[in-house]
Image (spheres, rainbow, N blue to C red):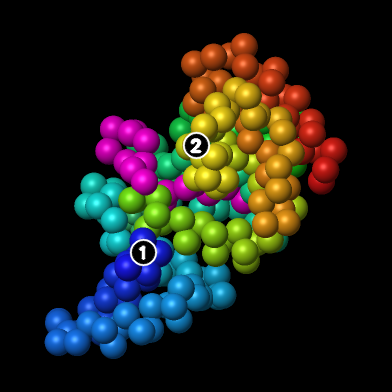
């Protein structure tokens, strides 16, 4: 069974569990339905409810809040970071710590948009302990939710913030973010532009000029 089927089967088991089932004698019956379960709901609120109750990976054990994402669900531009940090975990909102404040400034000052006019999400929706990079198996479990959000929002442009976001969105594990940033790539018909993560900018303010250039490209494509 591949990872997607395993994740789908797990999701299905959680649904049955929520309905009161405790065990199954014949798991093959469920396995036949896993393809169907890959179809996450098209209804935004239903998807949100599902995600807020998700316990598909170990991050659910240490999180305080699931950070679903926020913004305009008809946004033209979607920012995707790595995962929630401490402030995000406390509040259930993405990018609200120091890095988030910087991202907000970039959105307002360079794109000349309000934060509420874009959509902001992360590769994983629960905080990895001590802000470590999300593990591949955690991303595998969580990514279908993000992909469904992208499908429903259908943005014109995705900005991948940092190498983790870039890597997991494109599958390119080799190219450093410093080499690929600012390139305009294709993500299933949506323009994808990788740039540095705002946390990196807080540690390396000299890279702000690069992000400024990348955001000018985003602005020109809006
Ligand atoms: S990180 Fe994603 S898959 Fe893991 S528990 Fe949170 S919502 Fe579920």
> Helix or strand or loop: what does disc 2 sit on?
loop
Residue 198 visible from this viewpoint: no
Where is ligand 1, by quadrant?
A: bottom left
Tell me where residue 39 appears, x and y as whole percent. Answer: 50, 75
- 101 above or below 116? above
Q: Which residues make up the magenta segment?
A: 119-136
Residue at horizontal 79%, vertical 34%? 217
CA distance separating discs 1 and 2: 20 Å
- Tell me the number on the disc at residue 218: none
Dot 1 corresponds to which residue?
2
Identity of the residue furthest to the right in this view: 220
Task: Tell whether position 122 is magenta.
Answer: yes
Using residue 107 as the reference point, say whether residue 134 is left or right of it: left
Residue at horizontal 62%, vertical 11%? 206
Q: Residues within 10 Å of mark 1 (few under 14, many from 20)?
A: few
Dot 2 corresponds to which residue?
173
Can you say which quadrant of the picture contains the N terminus? bottom left
């Amino acid at each position: 069974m591949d990872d997607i089927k395993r994740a789908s089967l797990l999701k299905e088991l959680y649904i049955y569990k929520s309905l009161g089932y405790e065990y199954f004698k014949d798991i093959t019956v469920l396995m036949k339905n896993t393809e169907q379960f890959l179809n996450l709901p098209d209804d935004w609120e239903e998807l949100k409810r599902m995600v807020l109750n998700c316990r598909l990976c170990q991050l659910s054990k240490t999180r305080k809040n699931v950070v679903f994402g926020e913004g305009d669900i008809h946004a033209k531009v979607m920012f995707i970071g790595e995962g929630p940090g401490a402030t995000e975990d406390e509040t259930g909102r993405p990018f609200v710590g120091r890095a988030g404040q910087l991202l907000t400034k970039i959105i307002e000052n360079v794109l000349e948009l309000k934060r509420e006019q874009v959509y902001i999400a992360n590769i994983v929706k629960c905080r990895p302990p001590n802000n470590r990079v999300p593990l591949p198996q955690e991303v595998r479990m969580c990514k279908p939710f993000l992909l469904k959000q992208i499908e429903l929002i259908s943005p014109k442009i995705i900005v991948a913030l940092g190498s983790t976001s870039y890597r997991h969105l494109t599958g390119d594990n080799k190219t450093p973010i410093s080499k690929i940033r600012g390139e305009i790539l294709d993500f299933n018909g949506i323009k994808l532009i990788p740039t540095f993560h705002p946390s990196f900018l807080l540690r390396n303010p000299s890279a702000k000029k690069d992000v400024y250039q990348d955001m000018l490209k985003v602005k020109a494509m809006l």
